Image (cartoon, rainbow, N blue to C red):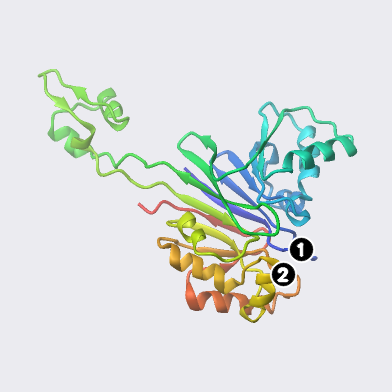
Amino acid sequence: MNLEAFILGCGGMMPLPNRHLTSVLLRREGELFLFDGGEGTQVSLRRLNLRWKKISAIFVSHTHADHVTGIPGLLMLSSQVDRNDPLYIFGPPRIAEYVDTSRRVLDMYINYDIVVKEINEPGIVYEGEGFHVRCFSLRHTKPCFGYTLEEAMRPGEFHPGSALDLGVPRGPLWSRLQSGETVKLEDGREIRPADVMGAPRTGRKFSYVTDTLYFPGIAGEVKDSDLFICEGMFEKEMEENAREKKHMTAEQAARIAAEAGGVKKLALIHYSPRYTEFHLKQLIKEAQRIFPQAVLSRDRMVFPIEYAD
């Protein structure tokens, strides 16, 4: 099952010619999930040829303009295609007011259900087949949440040779064993899944954190992430400024990844517009000193998320 993250925008505060505002799309097979929707989201969706009508849910970190100004246009765009499924929008208090006001003031034509759910405390906010999305509190100038999408454990690998050695014939019994069912053979023997399958295998984990002070508690939330997307808005010499504005430096993002344990890759995002493409090299240099698996995300970059086993 494919899982991949698309960077639709990596900028913070204001859009630049080659840097849209923060937005990340996660595709799990044919289902799409959007994390924030800054200005320029639709442009990247179009350039990546992604089918926006397949977006099942939008997860909003907070209601600052550079994270939500792309959402109204996306809602209107979705009315131009056939859509039967509801669109879920999750976010902190006042996200419902923002959506409702935008619909009313812009006189939107909406021909599908929009279900807005405001988050008041950490926990699981969305569940699908074999996965869930969980939110956790961040520390910004207004209520803000980070998110993880985590898959359930997968069955172990099926060993055909072991099944044949035990006298299990090819066919439906193999399928039942792989589904976790104990089967009985014609001679009366019972064969359990553990007799013919390896140990359960881990699923994958994606984490998204932006617009927050650094604090150690974030590490526990993003532990074992296969891909951890995190704001690295400033370089180290701007740490005091970052603290005043309740943001993080690239070095602090790397520290979280290192402290968490099990993080496979860190992708920095939400850069200050003060940094040109040339000066972004300083951010990644500072991050990689602490966490070598750190990379700079760029608009329309794609990150495949593979199984560890």
| Residue labelled with disc 1 | 13
| Most foreground residue, 184 or 93 | 93
Q: Amino acid at mark 1?
A: Met
Q: Residue furthest bottom?
A: 237
Q: Position of residue 23 (x, y in %)?
A: 68, 54
| Most foreground residue, 47 or 200 | 200
Label 1 Cα crowd, 10 Å radius (few <14 / some 14-19 / many 20+): some
Label 2 Cα crowd, 10 Å radius (few <14 / some 14-19 / many 20+): some
Q: Amino acid at mark 2?
A: Ser
Residue at screen point 74% across, 64% down? 19
Task: Report whether 148 appears left or right of 210.
Answer: left
Task: Report whether 75 appears left or right of 164.
Answer: right
Q: Which numbered circle lies on residue 272?
A: 2
Q: Position of residue 60 (x, y in %)?
A: 67, 47
Whichever of callouts 1 and 2 sits on the residue coming sooner in the sequence is: 1
Task: Report whether 236 appears left or right of 168.
Answer: right
In the image, is residue 146 above or below residue 13? above
Q: What is the secondary structure assignment of the residue under circle 2? A: loop
Residue at screen point 67% across, 52% down? 143
Q: Which numbered circle lies on residue 112?
A: none
In the image, is residue 43 above or below residue 182? below
**Residue 119 position by quadrant:** top right
Could you tell me if residue 221 is visible in this image?
A: yes
Q: Are marks 1 and 2 in contact (CB under 8 Å)?
A: yes
Q: Position of residue 259 (x, y in %)?
A: 44, 66
**Residue 272 position by quadrant:** bottom right
Q: Position of residue 9 (x, y in %)?
A: 70, 58
What separation in Å lies between label 1 and label 2 (alpha carbons)?
7 Å
Q: What is the secondary structure assignment of the residue under circle 1? A: loop
Q: Residue furthest left?
A: 187
Could you tell me if residue 226 is visible in this image?
A: no
Residue at screen point 57% across, 55% down? 208
